[in-house]
Amino acid sequence: MANWTHISRTIDELKNLVRDVYDSKIFTSLQIDNKEITKLSMVFMPMLFIGSAPCPPNLDGDNQKNRRAKLQYIQDCIEYEEDNEKREIYLKHIGMVYEYYDKASPRGINGMPIFTSCRIVSIDDTKKFLDMYNKYQKMRESFENEWK
C-alpha cells in the first residue's frame, strides 16, 4: 500500500523554496491560471499517474507465470480500492506542485515547461510559503528600490 501522507516542510526548506521561486529557478502550479487547471497534468506529467489503477498483467505462454501474474493483479486491485479513500484525501490536500526549471524537458506546451518529475507541497505548507513569499518579495523590492 502507498503512503498517502504529506511531508511537512521545515522553515528552512520553505525559505529555500521562496528564494528559488523568487529567483525564477522553480516553476509552480501557482503560475498556471486556475481557469486552465487541466494544464496541470500537461506541465507536471506525474500528476496524470497519481492514484492510477494497476495495469493488467502481460500474459505469455507460461501458465504458472500467468497464474502468479493474475493473482498479483487481483491483489493490487484490492489494495487500490482499499487505498482509494486515503488517496482522495491526499489529493484534496495538495496545495502546490513544483519543480526546478533545470529538470524541464526540452519541449514545452503553450509557453510552459513540461516536467517528468514534480514535488508536492501540502495546503498548510503552501499557505506558509505564500506568506513568506510575500514578505520576501517586499523585502527584495525595498532593497532594490533603495539604490535606484
Image: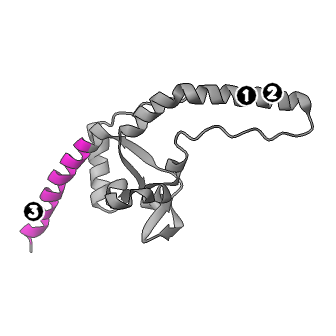
Q: Nearer the viewer, mark 1 or mark 3?
A: 1
Find residue 72 and name its label.
1
Rounded to the nearest angstrom, the CA distance separating label 1 from label 2 is 6 Å
Between 15 and 132, the one nearer to me in the picture: 132
Q: Residue at x 41, y 44 (%)?
A: 120
Q: Estimate the x, y position of residue 136 in percent, counting from the top left.
A: 18, 53
Three-letter amino acid code of the residue under disc 2:
Arg
Colour scheme in use? one colour
Residue 136 lies, with reference to residue 75, above or below; the image says below
Disc 1 + disc 2, Cβ < 8 Å: yes
Residue 7 lies, with reference to residue 127, above or below; the image says above
User: Where is mark 2, residue-wise?
Assistant: 68
Task: Please provide the residue range marked out in magenta.
Answer: 127-147
Three-letter amino acid code of the residue under disc 1:
Gln
Q: Secondary structure at mark 2?
A: helix
Q: Secondary structure at mark 3?
A: helix
| Furthest-right residue in this view | 61
Q: Earlier in the sequence, mark 1 or mark 3?
A: 1
| Furthest-left residue in this view | 146
Find residue 86 and name its label.
none
Q: Work out whether residue 32 can be spotted.
A: no
Q: In the rendered view, does 65 fall on the left or right side of 45?
A: right
User: Where is mark 3, residue-wise?
Assistant: 142
Question: Looking at the rendering, which quadrant does residue 82 occupy?
Answer: top right
Query: Which corner quadrant holds the N terminus?
Result: top right
Between 30 and 80, the one nearer to me in the picture: 80
Three-letter amino acid code of the residue under disc 3:
Ser
Using a 10 Å C-alpha cutoff, classify the residue at mark 2 as few (fewer than 14 neighbours), some (14 to 19) or many (20 or more): few
Question: Looking at the rendering, which quadrant does residue 71 occupy?
Answer: top right
Q: Secondary structure at mark 1?
A: helix
